[in-house]
Image (cartoon, grey):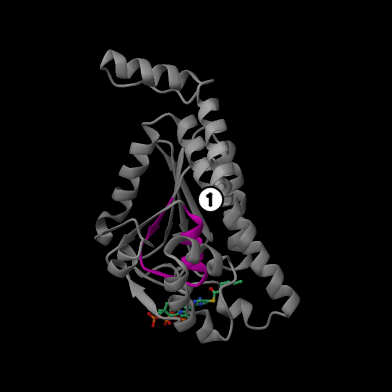
Amino acid sequence: MTDKNLLIEIEDKIAIVTLNRPKAMNALNEITLLELQDAFISFATNNEVEVIIVTGNGEKAFVAGADIAAMQSLTALKARQFAKLGHQVMRHIEACPKPVIAAVNGFALGGGCELALGCDIRIASENACFGQPEVNLGVIPGFGGTQRLARLIGKGRAMELILTGNMIDSDEAYRIGLANKVVPLEQLLDTAKKMASVIISKGAYAVGMAKEAIRNGLELDLDRANQYEAELFGLCFTTSDQKEGMQAFLDKRPAKFTGK
Ligand code: HXC
């Protein structure tokens, strides 16, 4: 095993990004966040990548949070900068025109839960645990957890998780909509890859537009969001994938999408 903070493999148009600090339960420090940011900037324009899977090295942790040892002696100003760096990284993940699947293989706590929240879809292994335990450390979530968790699972449930600092198991995460599905650990990566392959078999342009419509539309009021959706829907009609997709349906044959 190398001592890189991030391992990246690209195969069959799927980039697998593995957080690789197993001795610290893959905790996020500044350098790892910067590496994640660089990776997502490059995925956005890399034609060899259509879907990204984010996971953690080992069987215990996805990411157990921001690195507590590195944060302990931060000044207020540095702590604020660190939070903002995390926000920036999550924004790069969200703004990436390609779908991002979190394959949550164990503890997803604090910044780890926030990283999973920044991804588009979360698949959890049976042993996964989610939580925002920052109040146990005398702080609050700082990589967007107070905002994204409430938007995903609702204010009341987000309040409970964040104010108690309690951890929940993967079944509960599934029940409240934090995890999209739960599978045995040994099937986790294959499940994520299969989902990625299904997405890749669709027109990449339409997939990117759909992600953009959901992500940006959620930040608008419904009328403006619908207007935005209509604009993106119209844009799809500039593509050969739209012509191919609809013709293939009428011809009763599978579509051959090119992403153009
Ligand atoms: C640094 C961490 C870490 C973390 C675990 N480790 N989590 N190091 N930062 N977030 C290290 C431990 O210090 C230990 O190192 C090794 O990983 C194994 O951890 P153990 O505690 O011995 O394992 P275990 O008993 O199995 O408990 C696992 C655990 C626990 C439940 C995940 O480690 C834990 O509670 N970790 C902290 C979780 C947390 O509070 N996360 C939120 C952080 S704040 P050694 O060297 O002793 O072997 C945050 C804020 C985000 O994320 C926003 C910032 C702006």
Location of residue 254 in the rendering, given as x and y in whole percent from the top left corner: 29, 21
Examine the rendered structure and indicate whether residue 32 appears above or below residue 209: below
Location of residue 59 in the rendering, given as x and y in whole percent from the top left corner: 34, 66
Return the residue found at the far front: 223
Q: Quadrant of residue 197?
A: top left
Q: Quadrant of the N terminus?
A: bottom left
- At x 37%, y 65%, the residue is 58
- At x 52%, y 69%, the residue is 111
What residue span does the magenta drawing correspond to? 101-119
Q: Quadrant of residue 141?
A: bottom right
Name the residue beneath numbered marker 1. 218
Q: Is residue 49 visible?
A: no
Label 1's element? loop
Location of residue 12 in the rendering, given as x and y in whole percent from the top left corner: 39, 36
Q: Can residue 86 be seen in this view?
A: yes
Examine the rendered structure and indicate whether residue 11 appears above or below residue 176: above
Total numbered circles: 1
Residue 158 is a magenta residue: no
Location of residue 185 in the rendering, given as x and y in whole percent from the top left corner: 27, 61
Examine the rendered structure and indicate whether residue 45 appears above or below residue 154: above
Is 79 positioned to the left or the right of 47 in the image?
A: right
Q: What residue type is labelled 1?
A: Leu
Q: Which of 167 and 75 is in front in this view?
A: 167
